[in-house]
Image (tube, rainbow, N blue to C red):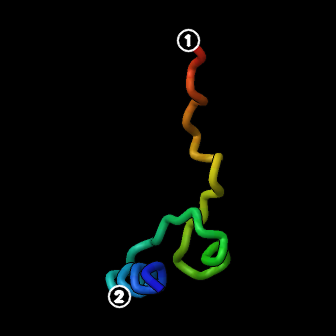
């Protein structure tokens, strides 16, 4: 339910919501970034 409140707040302010929640992936004004695809480098082995 908290995610829905965040989405409603973003819409009320004309903002784009960035999320990793697949349930929101196809909604308007939502940008979905799947987990593990953040563009960060994997941790280095020591």
- 12 shown above or below 19: below
Nearest the eye: 5 or 31: 5
Name the residue carrying label 2: 12
Mark positioned earlier in the residue sequence (2 or 1): 2
Find residue 29 and report its horizontal and vertical position in percent. Answer: 52, 77
Q: Residue at x 56, y 66 (%)?
A: 31
Name the residue carrying label 1: 46
- 2 shown above or below 35: below
Q: Residue at x 60, y 16 (%)?
A: 45
Find residue 25 and report its horizontal and vertical position in percent. Answer: 64, 72
Q: Secondary structure at mark 1?
A: loop
The alpha-carbon separation of the residues under discs 2 and 1 comes to: 47 Å
Q: Residue at x 47, y 79 (%)?
A: 3
- 32 shown above or below 12: above
Find residue 9 and report its horizontal and vertical position in percent. Answer: 35, 83
> Relative to 5, is 22 on the left or the right?
right
- Badge 1: residue crowd in 10 Å (few <14, some 14–19, many ≥20): few
Can you say which quadrant of the picture contains the C terminus?
top right
Find residue 30 and report its horizontal and vertical position in percent. Answer: 54, 73
Could you tell me if the residues under marks 2 and 1 are in contact, i.e. CB atoms within 8 Å? Answer: no
The answer to which image quadrant residue 28 occupies is bottom right
Q: Residue at x 60, y 65 (%)?
A: 32
Rendered image: mark on residue 13: none
Q: Outermost residue, left direction?
A: 13
- 15 shown above or below 35: below
């Amino acid at each position: 339910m908290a995610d829905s409140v965040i989405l409603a707040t973003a819409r009320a302010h004309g903002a784009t919501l960035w999320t990793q929640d697949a349930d929101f992936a196809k909604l308007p004004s939502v940008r979905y970034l799947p987990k593990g695809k953040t563009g960060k480098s994997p941790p280095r082995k020591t």
